[in-house]
Amino acid sequence: EGKVTVPGIIQAKKEGRKLVMVTAYDYPFGLMADEAGVDMALVGDSLGMVVLGLDSTVPVTMEMMIHHIQAVVRGCKRAMVIGDMPFMSYNTGIRDAVINAGRLMKEGGCDAVKLEGGVDFAPVVEAIVKAGIPVQGHVGLTPQTASALGGFKMQGKDAAAARKIVEDASALETAGAFSIVAEAVPAPLGALLAESVAVPVIGIGAGVGVDGQVLVTHDMVGLFDRFVPKFVKQYTKVRPTIIDAIKAYGQEVRAGSFPAPEHSFGMPDEALAALKA
Ligand code: KIV
Ligand code: NA
């Protein structure tokens, strides 16, 4: 079976097939996500936090995104690669947004882009889609505007706030988004969102009643644990494994037991004799 396509993603919802998405930021993780059979690999701007050590996604640039998208694309043969549009690459007008979405696709090589926002960004989504670039929406908690939202907290708590998020999703669908990420919303609202649009709703902290799930891989495998949001399940904890390996190497280097003969290159006896003569 070939590359995952936009029609294939939309069809999955019609067939009741749950979609699987994870983040990837480099070639080895692109390869692993692809080999694990995910439908979509998201080069999220979360890379700013989990691989670059920034405090938020706000400082992430187009150049950072393109650099990481290129690496993931090289690793994904089957999975659809989605590139996140960084903060201020689509917020300053439709023309900027189309140009920057085009750069992610042309220079980065991704199959689709994702951007945060609902009703207010529907015209932007529509223009990018019309330019021939598939767009995934992102509603609920939108980390790029966490400052305006009052922090990294659950969205859609009361009826009015929840209704606004349903309107956001609906506007994105009308604008032509092929799927919509819903982040940190009550599970019943997640289910309502999935019911109210025909395109797949991909949840992260949106309960099980949506059409698919996404997690930040570095959270899910325990590679990044400075903080672990409630909605993250750690399927493994690779961080201690890696630290232990580096420690063991350090001990062997300091003890002179690494490298052993099998990790060392030999030299013909006569060459060595001539060298020493
Ligand atoms: O940047 C990211 O990883 C994301 C996902 C959490 C959806 O936007
Ligand atoms: Na993101």
Image (tube, grey):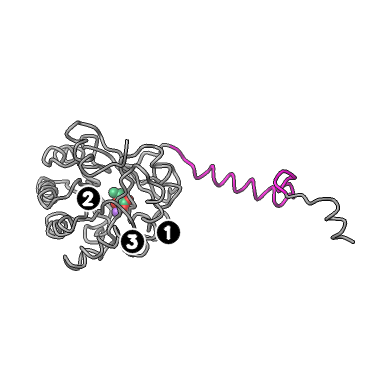
Image x and y of residue 260, in percent: 73, 45
Left or right? Give the position of 88 relative to 118. Answer: right
Sequence-earlier tag: 1 or 2: 1
The circle on residue 107 is 3
Q: Secondary structure at mark 2?
A: strand
Q: Is residue 245 magenta?
A: yes
- From the Cβ of disc 3, is ligand 2 less than 8 Å away? no
Q: Main secondary structure of the magenta part?
A: helix
In the rendered image, the vertical position of residue 19 relative to residue 157, given as above or below: above
Would residue 2 be found to the left or right of residue 191 on screen? right
For residue 267, side relative to residue 74 (left or right): right
- Residue at 20% across / 50% down in the picture? 139
Magenta-tinted stretch: 236-264
Q: Does the segment drawn in magenta span residue 136?
A: no
Residue for badge 1:
53
| Alpha-carbon span between mark 3 and mark 2 | 19 Å
Question: Could you give the CA–CA distance between mark 1 and mark 2, rounded to whole angstroms?
Answer: 26 Å
The answer to whether residue 138 shows anywhere in this view is no
Q: Which residue is drawn at the image coordinates 19% and 36% (left, top)?
A: 13
Which residue is painted at 23% across and 65% down in the image?
Answer: 99
